[in-house]
Amino acid sequence: MKLNTLLTSAALVLGLAAGAAAQDRTKVGFVYVGPVGDGGWTYEHDKGRQAVEGAFGDAVETVFVESVPEGPDAERVMTQMALDGADLIFTTSFGYMDATNNVAAKFPDVKFEHATGYKREHPNVSTYSARFYEGRAIQGHIAGNMTESNIIGYIASFPIPEVIRGINSAYIHASKVNPDVEFKIIWVYTWFDPAKEADAATALIEQGADVILQHTDSTAPQAAAQAAGNVVTFGQASDMGEYAPFPRVSSIIDDWAPYYIARTKAVMDDTWESMDTWDGIGPGMVGIGTISDAVPADVKAEALAMKEALGSGEYHAFTGPLNKQDGSPWLAEGETADDGTLLGMNFYVEGLTGEIPQ
């Protein structure tokens, strides 16, 4: 009888200790717009989540929900995470912006971090993004040098400032080295849909594009280009190195791990504050994947020099003289774009054809 009592007491103590340990852990949630195996955007965010686990071990618990549509379902998922005890929730797509702020209003003790958005309507909301347009400048330089048809295809997701900035930056730098270059843009209205992305890549190739850029998350455009033959591509968000050295000749890599670790630590230390973060090549949030030997040596050297100049701040990707698409002046000689204009960018630069969908 005494032995049973001792065993019961020991089990109770262990149970209470385990419960206390679980309560002491910081719970971090991640809401993903695509699957963790997309090979691009969500894959890199999930690598950041795993880095948080690696940095803090048993002091944290991470949870995630993948393939959450932008809309009412996102608000439901965030609400459930908060109800389940999350201390910090990262919402990793532009279209989660309103849902993030709506849920944050209901859970003032939970910290929310929204990727690529601009609304901070509550003191428990922060925003963070990367200056992807810096990587697009490098891609544009390489693309403008490598195209033989002078037609560059661009698979665009949604007509939001982030995507428009990327198109403009890539075009500016492609046209600098090749004034005859033409951009053909297909809007697919999705972040991740391999079938649509493959169809868009194929359509662009059929229209004469021998370089394909993408602002979508799957590797389907890489596969379509590989099947077509002599078509150059670039990895998006992740290295997509399985397609190197050709057709993928370089990539933009998003490295979220340092940010996720720092913001989790801030919650653990009770030093978290609402803030906006917009980092690029210099701080390491934007990386440039290995430039393969399919790129001519002189072009590769120029691209790497641009990377260094962008990283140090010596060069800005939007430096005048630049006009808007309608020919009206935008930036004078040597003038650089301010962040406010870039964050709200809703126009094409001169030389791009077609209209931005509304």
Image (cartoon, helix red, strand yellow):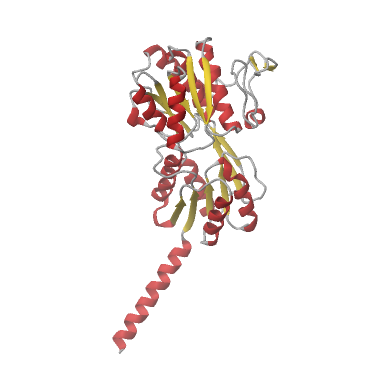
Residue 30 at x, y percent in the picture: 49, 49
Left or right placement of residue 357 versus residue 16 in this view:
right
Say above or below: 169 vs 94.
above
Q: Which residue sits at x=44%, y=43%?
A: 48
Can residue 91 be seen here? The reply is: yes
- Which quarter of the image is occupied by the N terminus? bottom left
Can residue 236 be seen here? The reply is: no
Toward the right, the furthest residue is 328
**Image quadrant where residue 251 sits:** top left
Q: Between residues 333 and 142, which one lies in front from this camera angle?
A: 142
Say above or below: 215 vs 351.
below
Left or right placement of residue 61 versus residue 317 in this view:
left
Q: Between residues 238 and 275, which one lies in front from this camera angle?
A: 238
Q: Which residue sits at x=40%, y=57%?
A: 58
Q: Which residue sits at x=54%, y=27%?
A: 166
Q: Between residues 75 and 1, which one lies in front from this camera angle?
A: 75
Say above or below: 341 vs 147.
below
Number of callouts:
0
Left or right placement of residue 223 versus residue 168 in this view:
left
Residue 272 at x, y percent in the picture: 57, 50
Q: Which residue sits at x=60%, y=58%?
A: 109
Residue 161 at x, y percent in the picture: 61, 31
Toward the bottom, the furthest residue is 1
Residue 239 at x, y percent in the picture: 39, 32
**Image quadrant where residue 13 sits:** bottom left
- Which quarter of the image is occupied by the C terminus? top right
